[in-house]
Image: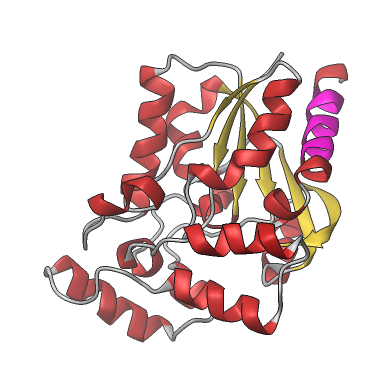
Amino acid sequence: MSTFVLLHGGGMGGWTWKYVRALLEAKGHTVYTPTFTGFGEREHLTGRDVGNATHVQDIVNVFKYEDLHDVILVAHSYAGTVAPGVIAQVGDRIASVIYLDAIVPYSGERIASLMGYMPEEQVATLDAMLEAGEGPVGSGVHEMQRAAAKEHPHLMDPAREQWLLDKLSDQPMKATAGRIAVGAETIKQPVDYIAAAVTVMSAMHERARALGWTMHQHPGDHALLVGDPEGTVDLILKIVGRKVSA
């Protein structure tokens, strides 16, 4: 059986893997679903200095204190910016890397400008404010997601979508405006990328292809891990099984 470390997306937390985790554990796998500082049940720990480097350290510490080896690392959405930093530090403990409709950043980029939320110059100014102990602590990602869901409901049961939306929490502004020190181009080992059909990550799909990553398609939307956990788990296990048999 395999050991999985599942990394969550923006405005979410380890809780978002509830359905995927249950399915994997039912098949005998060991699953860790850590929550980044400032998100979910750890939202009270947010601050202007909480950003990508903090979240990389969050996960490196999970590997260290749980004594994890031969791990399958799965990164959803925002976690695509965290995974490269983790791999740079504990890559020898990671057997397989899977990006689940995740951001594919290059070193030095910032999420806010990369995703088109605001111009790079404006983001850099905001980051400088944060470094000086000024500016907004949160980025309002949770409210952006709720507003988007009103215009374009998720491809899932309405009750489950409400569960997802109710639990969303803010994302530290530093995570959105700060530079990503270690980008996806530094990952030396093979990466599998699961691309959702209905998503704001289409440009990230092209980046994954350009990096030579192996692409897999899912007919769902960006929240596929909640909307279709069964299909998500099937895809992940097929990828893992292919690597093992190879």
Tell me, yes or no, whether the highlighted magenta stretch contains residue 238. yes
Position of the C terminus, as image quadrant, is: top right
- Give the main secondary structure of the magenta stretch: helix
Q: Which residues are magenta?
A: 233-243
Tally of numbered tags? 0
Asked whether, in this view, residue 158 is left or right of residue 40, the answer is right
Closer to us: 168 or 111: 168
Evaluate whether residue 207 shows in this view. no
Does residue 196 show up magenta in the picture?
Answer: no
For residue 25, above or below residue 36: above
Q: Residue at x 75, y 44 (%)?
A: 229
Q: Where the N terminus falls, by quadrant?
A: top right
Q: Which residue is rendered at x = 41% and y = 57% of the image?
A: 180
User: Quadrant location of residue 24?
Assistant: top right
Residue occupying image coordinates x 54% and y 59%: 105
What x and y, as percent, mark residue 100?
68, 49
Residue 25, given in percent of the width and then of the height, sits at 67, 23
Q: What colouring method underlies this structural image?
A: secondary structure
On the image, the x and y values in percent for residue 209 come to 77, 57
Side (left or right) of 98 relative to 52:
right
- Residue 162 placement: quadrant: bottom right
**In the displayed structure, would residue 117 be above or below residue 235?**
below
Q: Is residue 155 visible?
A: yes
Check the image and name the residue furthest to the front: 159
Judged left or right of residue 240, residue 92 is left
Residue 142 percent location from the top left of the image:
46, 69
* Residue plotted at (46% across, 57% down): 107
